[in-house]
Image (tube, grey):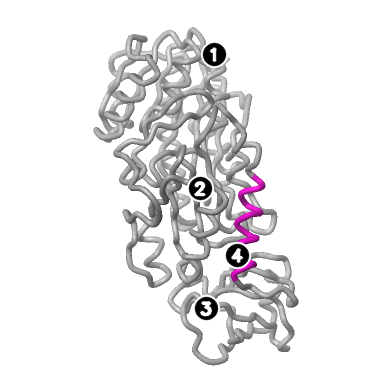
Amino acid sequence: MHVVKLKKGKEKAVKQLHPWVFSGAIETVNGHPVNGEIIIVNDNKDIFLAYGFYNNQSRVAVRLLEWDEKIIVNENWWRKRIQKAIKARSKLLLDTNTNTYRLIFSEADFLPGLIVDRFSDFLSVQILTSGIEHHKEIILDELELLLKPSGIFDRSDSSAREHDGMTASNGKLLRGLQPPEYVTVKENGVLYDVDITSGQKSGFYCDQRDNRRIVAEYCKDKKVLDCFSYSGGFSLNALKNHASEVTSIDSSASALDTLKRNLDINNFKELNHKIIQSDVNKQLRAFRENGEKFDLIILDPPKYAPSRSAVNKASRAYKDLNRQALLLLNEGGLLATFSCSGAVDMTTFKQILAWAALDAGKQVQFINQFSQPEDHPIRSSFPEGEYLKGLLCRVFSFI
């Protein structure tokens, strides 16, 4: 087995069970391991630290898998890791009101670069690292054995694969039956038609499952605005919880077409609901010019900060977006606002809201905090896995 030797002083993170070794931390590589091959990581004194898979084209040159020298990373190891991740979701697997969730969450489940989502009888898989690609068939075999899905479909993000020197693979049927154009799933008792072959990301954002339910509890008899609505997750939950009126805004025509389908299958079509295809920032300004007001506004924008270098620019974008929403709320209204940028932590996000409130001439009370659900766990030795955060704010004018 090839050996990667670290520079002096670079072993600390490995000993603390962080799963990444950056290329700049490596002093020598013994031989020429193939990308995705399992190697040994030693410290500067050639003392064993961990096993991991190697990639000479990635900034993260080694993704660590196992810290016990006695445990060999073989086929049985991979199968046990998958079994452990699935077992950890046993409560969700038994939930009759929900049949869509994340089964494997990459580093958080000690399987770097592997994401598996369930959509009713189908699985959507993202294979984002060369080490997972190298062991793909074992992984697929075990998923079939444990879950017996109708089919397994590949939704691997091409840009992420490129970082590991791999070509795009998005859009392939890996096992079983081809999914239909729409797979109907259930989340918290609400039905959704999901395009798992070509919808955004894996086809559905199951990481907002708990937050959709919580926000809906505040929607009864409220005039609700759902911004970046996509296929209607927050909108449908608001309607289910008897909001007096819901307006959904998204720039994607295909997403809004799916939202219309979701209204139909839930028999919500006759309820008081408006759909607007528009850029959200532009539409918020138009609402203000027209004197429109709302009781509850939901902001669930795409990732504004893909890296730490983008945080300052993203903070300005988040501040402006939230400022516009604050100006559209009735006195004592509620703002449910989210960020999926991992580089923007909760402390920073709260500060952004404080700045937005000052600029809008409003006072804000934080009455609830949101995070990612249990199927998107945050590993203590890998804080980078925490990305989704949100705040429920009660909004008042200056006293």
Q: Where's the N terminus, which quadrant?
A: bottom right
Identity of the amino acid at label 3? Answer: Glu
Pointer 3 local density, CA inside 10 Å: few below 14, some 14–19, many at least 20? some
Taking the spot 59% from the left edge, 42% from the top edge, the residue there is 346
Pointer 1 local density, CA inside 10 Å: few below 14, some 14–19, many at least 20? some
Q: Which numbered mark, 2 or 1, is in the foreground of this view?
A: 2
Q: Which residue is mark 1?
A: 332
Query: From mark 2 to mark 1, how far is it between C-alphas?
Result: 50 Å
Counting from the top left corner in percent of width and height, residue 79 is at 61, 62
Q: Secondary structure at mark 2?
A: loop
Q: Which residue is mark 2?
A: 148
Counting from the top left corner in percent of width and height, residue 249 is at 33, 26
| Residue 284 visible in the shown view | no
Q: Which residue is mark 4?
A: 78
Q: Where's the C terminus, which quadrant?
A: top right
Q: Which residue is mark 3?
A: 37
Comparing 276 with 261, the one in front is 261
Comparing 174 with 343, the one in front is 174
Q: Earlier in the sequence, mark 2 or mark 4?
A: 4
Q: Earlier in the sequence, mark 2 or mark 1?
A: 2
Counting from the top left corner in percent of width and height, residue 326 is at 45, 23
Q: Earlier in the sequence, mark 3 or mark 1?
A: 3
Residue interval drawn in magenta: 75-88
Comparing 252 with 176, the one in front is 176
| Residue 185 visible in the shown view | yes
Would you identify the image quadrant in which residue 90 lies?
top right
Identity of the amino acid at label 1? Answer: Gly
